[in-house]
Amino acid sequence: MKNIILASASPRRRELLSLAGFDFTVKTADTDETITEAVTPEETVKTLSKRKALAVAEQCKDSIVIGADTVVVIDNKILGKPKTRDEAYAMLSSFSGRSHYVYTGVFITDGKEEISFSEKTEVEFFDLTDDEINAYIATGDCFDKAGGYGIQTGGCTLIKRINGDYYNVVGLPIAQTARKLKTLL
């Protein structure tokens, strides 16, 4: 059986891949995450997940490598991870009482075959008060997550509903990933 390598440092992706029953190692490589051309969110996550996977695959020839990238989109604007309290506040307040979208791209390769796909999930927030936003920011949970919240942590209290794959919002559409990964094993 081939070794499986997750080309991501995300603890959430590691947890999901483990829950699905896969034995794997984690290896990351520095990759340029700049997208210079105007592309859709779907194209963005597919491109970035491919870059991440191929950067690791170059170093690990006889392995199956999985790359993933997640972005949050509102008003046709891609949001990354907030770096400051003000950025987190701006992101969370922009979601208040509205829907936004989470896209995750996944790229899997065994050196011969390549599988690329993306998932899109709609997330609707409750109307949020300043106190609710500030209390969530004070937990620090917002700073290592695209869009500034974690659906699987304290951010769950901000969310009114989702339409789509919950695990996509966590950072990896695991059911679809597992099915496609098994085709290369």
Image: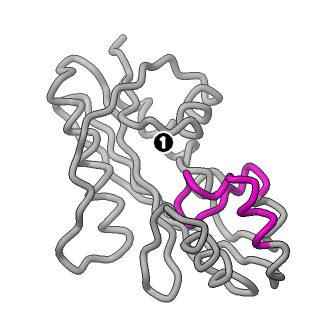
**Camera-side residue of 181 and 135:** 135
- Residue at (46% x, 57% y) in the render: 70
Place of residue 15 in the rendered image (x, y in percent of width and height, measured from the top left): 61, 32
Indicate the quadrant where residue 34 lies. Answer: bottom left
**Camera-side residue of 115 and 89:** 89
The residue labelled by disc 1 is: 177
Task: Residue 144: say if magenta.
Answer: yes
The chief SS type of the magenta part is: helix
Location of the N terminus by quadrant is top left
Image side of residue 153 versus residue 176, left or right: right
62 shown above or below 70: above
- Residue at (73% x, 50% y) in the render: 152
51 shown above or below 148: above
**Camera-side residue of 89 and 35:** 89
- Residue at (84% x, 63% y) in the render: 157
Q: In the rendered structure, which segment of residues is drawn in magenta?
A: 133-154
